[in-house]
Image: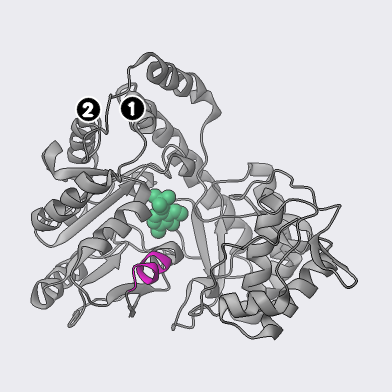
Amino acid sequence: MTVPSLPLTLDRGSAEPLGRQLADRVRDHVVTGALAVGRRLPSTRALATDLGVSRSVTEHAYDQLTAEGWLETRHGSGTYVAAGAAPRPRSRTTHARTGTSELLRLDTGTPWIDPRHTAAWRRAWRDVSAATPPRGYDDPAGLLDLRVELAGHLARTRGLTCDPDEILVTSGTIGGLSQVLGALPPGPVAHEDPGYRAAAEAIRAAGREIRDIPAAEPVTDLTGCSAAYVTPAHQHPLGPVMPGSDRLALIAAARRAGAVVIEDDYDSEFRYDVAPVPALAALDRDVVAYLGTTSKTVAPSMRLGWLVAPSDLHQRILARREITHDAPAWPVQRAFVSLLRDGYVDQVVRSARRIYAARAARVLAALRPYADPVAPVAGMYVTVPMPHARALRAAGVAAKAGFEVPLLGDYCRTSRRTGLIVGFGGVTDDELDRALAAVAEGLG
Ligand SMILES: Cc1ncc(COP(=O)(O)O)c(C=O)c1O
């Protein structure tokens, strides 16, 4: 049996120790079956050389995985995937593994999808199966029918008027962000701190430096930056809406610096009380690149979104896509057209908005006696600032009850905010109540 070469990448900029990162990557390969039972792994020395890390890093990872039962050492012959480590299915979005036990994560990004709407979902896919796919690569901007639907949707719900030809269909927010970053002139990208971790990863992956800007504070200087990534409708993860004066200041700063503002509008549909605030891009289409997603309304696994960019940026991205064909899969685009036309998206948004408002109220009622949660105006999580030690204690009690509650500190780069973030989209009411009872016990 040959020693496999492992496609592993480690993030040297991350605060997570390299040994732990490596153990996580190798464990993932075993769990998914990419490394089958009985496969021999590279020696710790060879892997350390491949990865350019010290041997103690690879030894630490192998020791950890051996202790967990994923790997076994055969004397004189090497390290192998252990006989009992058969791959097993697991939900990557709602469960986080700590050691070998599974916790139900109160994820900030997992939406609640009303099961009553499954008939429309099935109709959409029947529609796709009856349609004829394009013979060659389809329109590099994305399906025209979808762009027409989206133009109407954006004008109706986000106050953003644009032509279907000004829209690019993307593989979710992160797909769109990566394409924007690939088409901008060199330079650092300003990013809210604390902020969306996937965006930070995408910025780093594009080979760009991140300039931390304090979240939920006015941005007045973007000198030297090629872009600023922001979440103005609902700052992730602190929660507030960017006030009008801050919006104008941000746009003015971007204009002065010759930078693009990248607006991530991930969940503004889910305002509990009033209609969503208009998109930042509605104020200045020449400076703002607007990103929308189906991840909260339909499902994160759709990997579908849209981008409305200033025209020169749009042209650069489109020209590249004409060569690379880097547009989302046609069946997914086609299904989303059906979901929009059928009224599915409006229905799920309406019912989820009611559920989120009720669950947010539940979280506030459960935790207010012990902490000072930020009452959310929208979306599927409540941020609960508190000293780190308290947050850790509460998260620890929740973990014993079977729940992983995200720590606010995990979303910080240079800022020092601490607390918990209670996501309530991906759990049932009963699970939420049990998790809240555990958190309350940890805080009491
Ligand atoms: C701030 C923010 N932006 C965007 C997204 C969705 O990203 P994508 O469309 O790539 O799934 C999420 C999902 O959790 C998010 O929290």
* Image quarter (top left, top right, bottom left or bottom right) of the N terminus: bottom right
Q: Give the range drawn in magenta.
A: 200-207
Q: Do the residues labelled 1 and 2 touch (CB within 8 Å)?
A: yes
Q: Which residue is identified by label 1? A: 334
**What is the count of numbered marks?**
2
Residue 218 lies in magenta, yes or no? no
Give me the disc on residue 125. none
Q: Quadrant of ligand 1?
A: bottom left
Q: Mark 2 packing: few (<14 Cα in 10 Å), some, or many (20+)? A: few
- CA gap between label 1 and label 2 equals 8 Å
**Image position of 301 with respect to 344: above or below:** below
Picture quadrant of residue 167: top left
Do we see residue 59 in this rendering? Answer: yes
Position in image of residue 2 (x %, y %) = 71, 58
**Image position of 208 with respect to 231: above or below:** below
Q: What residue type is labelled 1?
A: Arg
Residue 203 lies in magenta, yes or no? yes
* Image quarter (top left, top right, bottom left or bottom right) of the C terminus: bottom right
Sequence-first tag of 1 and 2: 2
**Image position of 212 with respect to 335: above or below:** below
Position in image of residue 76 (x %, y %) = 88, 73
Q: Which residue is identified by label 2? A: 145
Q: Mark 1 packing: few (<14 Cα in 10 Å), some, or many (20+)? A: many
Picture quadrant of residue 79: bottom right
Do we see residue 390 in this rendering? Answer: no
Picture quadrant of residue 204: bottom left
